[in-house]
Amino acid sequence: MKKIDGGVTAAKGFKAASCQAGIKYQGRTDMAFVYSELPCVCAGTFTSNVVKAACVMWDKSIVESGSPMQAVVVNSGIANACTGKEGYDACEATAKAVEESLGVPYSSVAVASTGVIGMQLPVDKLVAGVKTMSTTLDGSIQAGTDASKAIMTTDTVNKEVAVSFEVSGKTVTLGGMSKGSGMIHPNMCTMLAFLTTDLAIEKALLQEAVSDVVKDTFNMITVDGDTSTNDTLLCMANGLAENEKITDKNADYEAFKEALKFVCEFLAKKMAADGEGASKLFEAKVVGAKDKQDARILSRAIVGSNLSKAAIYGCDANFGRFLCAMGYSGADFDQNDVELYFESVNGKLKVFDKGTPILFDEDKALEIMKADTVTVFVNMNEGEAQATAWGCDLTYDYVKINADYRS
């Protein structure tokens, strides 16, 4: 497997487009379109929030029906959540505009939205945007990059990645783009992500791979503890790589899962680092846990604590905050087994050793914590399981951004 240039247009047969539709933002692109030349098998994972956006319900129905998917239309600015029947009708109108423009069945068109909750979408602008983009679909890397920028809200950078790998003697490509900066919390974390591949694979295996990989990637990031109404990850596979179709969990399946994990982890970390107002990527790595579930719970608790996040922002090696978060996480452990370190490109420093605080060099701790990525490394000394979670520091700017988000 190797990382290559591109995103959603890297794989064979995929095109993208974007436009300024004026949904909410002015003077910037706010709609994106991803299209496959052939119908795709698809997989998806969605928000665990009981309050689900209309577009989530629309996409879930496509994924769960077993029907093919051939296009995704995304808007930013308005979330189409808490919008009742009118919101669902907007999804249908968008999909039917694709059918009218390109001749693909509207039942194979996914839609996604991100932005303010509780506002109705301007359907006329959505339809006009679809018609515009249908004429500008392009398979270039730039078209994919432009699409990744069009779906941003409070994101400060676009997020895209692509890899190539070998399957049964054929070169397969997997690309993706995502957005996410605020309202990010596990199960599923708040975000939109769209993955495209030219792999030939059975739908059930694609869904199993996606669901499994999400557990240790997108479900392991948090920015602010708020699980959105709109979380959506869609993966489309059109088979144009012409590999022998993957129908069981063989070496080819594992090669795909490895590539899928790389892409999802890359995008997940990009989102965590770009959390609203963030200045640092905050990573928690827990090793030596009793089981995988405990490792996940503990690492997510560390990066999810507001006090821990504030300490990371202030470069304060206040290890008690991280231990406290572990203690209320719900995982059962003995604090007298725990070792805790701070780590970055500037070094690694042990600060807590099996129930006892260690006298450490505060200047060295400060140097370590000034790095752009700071890791809290914890050895539970109780087993073999491990997990890593990602978040960001908590800054003054987070409050500023969210205090006037609607306006």
Image (cartoon, rainbow, N blue to C red):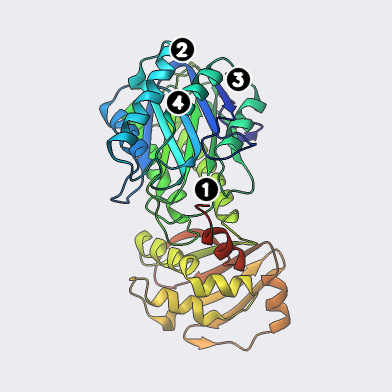
In the rendered view, tell whether residue 66 sits above or below residue 309.
above
Marks 2/4: CA–CA distance? 18 Å
State the residue at coordinates (43%, 57%): 185
Residue pointed to by mark 1: 180
Q: Pointers 3 and 2 in contact (CB under 8 A)?
A: no
Going from N to C along the chain, the mark reached first, 2 or 4, is 2
x, y percent for residue 292:
37, 59
Task: Answer few, some or many: residues within 10 Å of disc 4's Cα (few below 14, many 20 plus, some between 14 and 19).
Answer: few
The quadrant in which residue 250 appears is: top left
Q: Amino acid at mark 4?
A: Asp
Does dot 1 land on a helix, a strand or a loop? loop
Of badges 1 and 4, nearer the viewer stands 4
Q: Amino acid at mark 3?
A: Gly
The quadrant in which residue 162 appears is: top right
In the rendered view, tell whether residue 303 sits above or below residue 30.
below
Q: Is residue 12 visible?
A: no
State the residue at coordinates (30%, 22%): 67
Which numbered tag is attached to residue 10? none
Q: Pointers 3 and 1 in contact (CB under 8 A)?
A: no
User: Which of the image's four quarters has the N terminus?
Assistant: top right
Residue pointed to by mark 4: 124
Residue pointed to by mark 3: 139
Going from N to C along the chain, the mark reached first, 3 or 2, is 2
Residue pointed to by mark 2: 102
Task: Answer few, some or many: residues within 10 Å of disc 1's Cα (few below 14, many 20 plus, some between 14 and 19).
Answer: many
x, y percent for residue 161:
60, 37
Marks 3/2: CA–CA distance? 16 Å
Does dot 2 land on a helix, a strand or a loop? helix
Going from N to C along the chain, the mark reached first, 1 or 4, is 4
Q: Amino acid at mark 1?
A: Gly
Of badges 4 and 3, nearer the viewer stands 4
